[in-house]
Amino acid sequence: MRTDSLLIHGGVDGDKQTGAVNVPIYLTSTFRQAGLGEDFGWEYARTGNPTRCAAEKLVAELEGGVSATAYASGMAAITAVLSLFKQGSRLIVSRDVYGGTFRVLDQIFKPFGITYESYDMTDLSGLAEKLTEEVKAVYIETPSNPLLSVTDIQAVAEIAHAKQKLVIADNTFMTPYLQKPLELGADVVIHSGTKYLSGHSDTVCGFVVVKNEKLGKRLAFIQNATGGVLPPFDSFLTIRGIKTLGVRMDRHVKNATELAAWLAGHPAVKKVYYPGLESDPGYALQRRQARGAGGVVSFELRRKYDARKMFKSIRLITFGESLGGVESLMCHPATMSHASVPREIREAMGITDGLIRLSAGIEDVEDLKEDLERAFRKAKG
Ligand SMILES: *Cc1c(COP(=O)(O)O)cnc(C)c1O
């Protein structure tokens, strides 16, 4: 099946027993066993639940992996992946990695002796020399958050694999509909399914997909041993969300592309970050490795405009954390997602007080422009 059909019929298609077109929600913690050592394929719901396994199988197929594990959040998925490493291991991580990933590396894993080094993945010329003996993996996010810089997945994989290092890619911003990191050489794909996969801002979930069976078994072991599993109801919501992923992503990309072009020509805007704009430094690479530039656009206001007033004035667009839902969302990275990064470092990266991240929803784009136009007028100092 091609991706658009897999979204609807991939994984476990419906219910064999009744013919129901949807996978049932199995609200059970345990399963009856026929006798000693004779179960019906299921034992205890932390280890495996049929609704969760259906979601896992679906996401594995979409990413082109051999197996997937589903977690109660994207952060639980990332924690499971980091649990693959032992004390003394080191990771090379994208410089503008998701704030929560930075936090778990810095404040949970570093004290356990698993260290990391940030690296600017837009210039890979110095990557090979960073891959010393203790480095076990390269961890990337592309396009990155919130500056949408693009990393060449294939090139990272070639450099990393030459030294037998794993490549881990957070594919949350793209989804397998737009980009398949495993096909480009990555070994592990991570998702915050909270965003585009489920797509309706109604659940928090995470996935890890791999293409190596042994690694898949190890992750299933970690999932069961540490227990941050995705509950059955949330598994159902995610499967339901994924059915419309294709049509949603098409509209997200269309709206984001139109808004990025409109913002680039607006007098209130100093700079637009969106790899779908021809003027963006990541444009050619993004076109080569993905089917679209995604639904997130970041832009910097000119000095005369006050971001605070802007957030107060938007009506249709919601001011809040997160992204990837059907509704448009706007946030302020400097005081929200990247508040823990010291000001000088933050500003050197480009995350200024005037930077705004917009997750384009699937509303009528003219209404979104009108909402922004009104807010710009109110924000003008
Ligand atoms: C939101 C997000 C996460 C964390 O996922 P949660 O579901 O919020 O735990 C990780 N990576 C990226 C790129 C994200 O956007």
Image (spheres, rainbow, N blue to C red):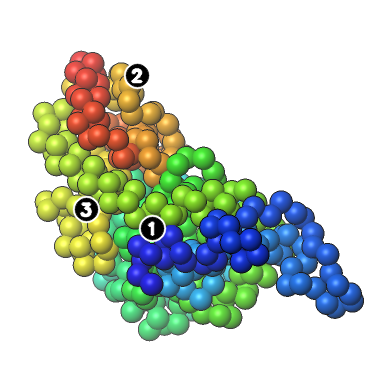
Residue placed under numbered mark 3 in the picture: 275
**Can you tell which of label 1 and label 2 is closer to the viewer?**
1
Callout 3: few (<14), some (14-19), or many (20+) C-alpha neighbours within 10 Å? many
**Distance between mark 1 and mark 2 Cα atoms:** 31 Å
| Quadrant assignment, res 337 | top left
Q: Position of residue 244 (x, y in %)?
A: 39, 51
> How many labels, in total?
3
The answer to which of marks 3 and 1 sits earlier in the sequence is 1
**Residue 374 versus residue 154 in the image, above or below:** above
> In this rendering, does residue 108 appear at all?
no
Q: Amino acid at mark 2?
A: Lys
Q: Would you place residue 68 above or below residue 259 in this image? A: below
Image x and y of residue 276, in percent: 19, 52
Q: List the residue tagged with mark 2.
A: 312
Residue 360 vs residue 246, the one in the foreground:
246
> Is label 2 in a helix, a strand or a loop?
helix
On residue 128, which mark appears?
none
- According to the image, label 1 marks what residue? 175
Answer left or right for 228 relative to 215: right
Measure the C-alpha gap from mark 2 to mark 3.
Answer: 28 Å
Which residue: 11% across, 51% down?
279
